[in-house]
Amino acid sequence: MKYIIGVDLGGTNLRIGLFNQNIRLIDKRVFSTQRFKDKEDLIEGIIQSIKNIIKDNALKGVDILGIGLGLPGPVEWKKQIVYFFPNIKGWHNVKLGKILKKRLKINIFMDNDANLICLAESRMGVAKGYRNLVCITLGTGVGGGLIIENKLYRGTNSVAGEIGHLPISQDGPICGCGAKGCLESYVGNLRIMREAKRIFKKDISLEELSRLAKLNNKKAIKIWRKTGEILGIALAGVVNLLNPQAIVIAGGVSNAGEVLFKSIRETIRKRAMPIQARQVKILSSRLKNDSGIIGAALLVKMEVKKC
Amino acid sequence: MKYIIGVDLGGTNLRIGLFNQNIRLIDKRVFSTQRFKDKEDLIEGIIQSIKNIIKDNALKGVDILGIGLGLPGPVEWKKQIVYFFPNIKGWHNVKLGKILKKRLKINIFMDNDANLICLAESRMGVAKGYRNLVCITLGTGVGGGLIIENKLYRGTNSVAGEIGHLPISQDGPICGCGAKGCLESYVGNLRIMREAKRIFKKDISLEELSRLAKLNNKKAIKIWRKTGEILGIALAGVVNLLNPQAIVIAGGVSNAGEVLFKSIRETIRKRAMPIQARQVKILSSRLKNDSGIIGAALLVKMEVKKC
């Protein structure tokens, strides 16, 4: 029996999972990304955590079929180069694949995290078996992945899927990407929390805001409804353009639950074209926090098979 | 030698072309769509024109490999059903394939016109050989087609590609589709002409508006620049989402030429994400008015091969 390691690097957490070849999770570790002080330290942290999870399970490098990494930014997945990370400083055109391969002597595979979440949900999650699928990840950044005709679609430079950077306004706030009116600048974590602070006159976490909405707090409900409406407008465009079977909504913000999903569904029904709107299912991620490591492990399994 | 017939039905013209198997155009007819008074009359017109082009070229039905039709609205291409035509009245869930097959005894193939224009440009036009391609058709309606990994992507109900119905504003004018703020309601023919009338204080055709811009008329230039900017905003979103190699711009409005294309290119460079924006080429349709009939003939050739 061989094993697979799936790594999910996020702005908040670094997750590492050990899987068997059937993508059954055997062991998992979670670290705070903040504890690594710079790029070198983070790379070293990834390497040591991988070594540890192998050793602690009484395995050796030769027992590992490959290591898959889901990364929080645009990645040239074939050349294994990180273009940059919008929310982790110091990463620019980093040949991460080469670095890890040299140190670990294990085959490395990598992709953008939203792509791998989309892959995981389409193979083992809520959208299992759907041939045409869009996945949107809601966090500090708003990412996305596309399954087209049952395959992960990466585009020409492997940076397709940037749903967070669909313009929903000709002007609007300046986004981190430099453009104006991007979806992300309306529904990213920071924007929602800023809006919550304005309305509640104090700092309030997203978890608290979700809890309040479930307790029927009108102000909290209003914030989630508005967030759902804006998401629905952008997703109506995606539905018109790609006519997918389903959209999977993942990431922390999606934990707001029914108040958010109802607003998204209603807006899509109202604003997308009737044939497309009738078809599309709006689903909540099933694999939740493990979707990234599962997707990374699936990537290894898929790519090793091709070798 | 066998032959193929390509039909391009538009709100303005009905075009019929006779091709050989290498998709070389042998004969072509153009009729005004307005001369047909209703759905039955239009179907009869299509049938008679096909019969005539066959007869006039001393051919028989058995010499025709198939008839391809590009249609101005959403089409279930496999079941050969027209869902509806936004700009021709009286068409709702019409089993056009069955009707034509019964009358003509020739194999029928059909698809949305923008899909077939995209196919034509990707196989024989300005985007020949591009694997990931977006085509936008600018006319009374704003349509689109997608080539993904070298294949026409039609989506779940074969209605993908509706670029004209990407929202670029949360509010904005009500679109023909029922939604608000769709691209089409900012850059469709009627909207441009209404804007021109407001500025020039008289009715002015798009051809005239293009001519004036080429003569350096400031007002005309301003209208085309603004049109290009709005198109650029929506297309920046498409570029971020699909990371295509190229976008082909087709349809009457694209004849405005460099003043329009420069504005589109500048806006995409400014508003799309850098990796995607660096890659994408913004191209003008090469096959122009013949792109629809060529695409329809290509569809026949592709599908017959599969049989």
Image (spheres, coloured by chain):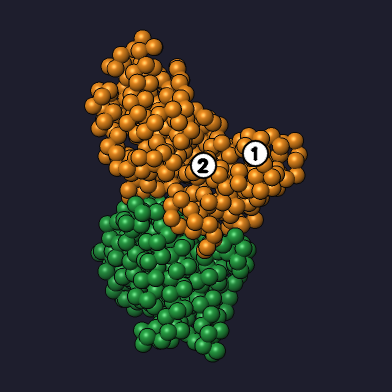
Chain colours: A orange, B green
- Residue type beneath disc 1: Ile
Residue count near mark 1 (Cα–Cα under 10 Å), binned few <14, some 14–19, many ≥20:
some
Q: Quadrant of residue B249?
A: bottom left
Of the 4 image quadrants, the one containing the N terminus of chain B is bottom left
Disc number lying in front (2 or 1): 1
Asked if residue B8 can be seen in this view, the reply is no
Q: Which residue is mark 1?
A: A204
Tell which subunit mark 1 falls on.
Answer: A
- Residue type beneath disc 2: Thr
Tell which subunit mark 2 falls on.
Answer: A
Residue count near mark 2 (Cα–Cα under 10 Å), binned few <14, some 14–19, many ≥20:
many
Seen at 75% across and 35% down, the residue is: A215
Query: Would residue A187 appear left or right of B242 to someone viewing this image?
Result: right
Residue B291 versus residue A135: which sits nearer the camera? A135
Residue A140: assigned label = 2
Residue A246 versus residue A206: which sits nearer the camera? A206
Residue A222: assigned label = none
Asked if residue B201 can be seen in this view, the reply is yes
The answer to whether the residue labelled 2 contacts the one labelled 1, judged by CB atoms less than 8 Å apart, is no
Estimate the x, y position of residue A272 in percent, counting from the top left. 59, 56
Specify which label sits upstream in the sequence, 2 or 1.
Answer: 2
Seen at 64% across and 40% down, the residue is: A203
Most extreme residue toward the left is: A102
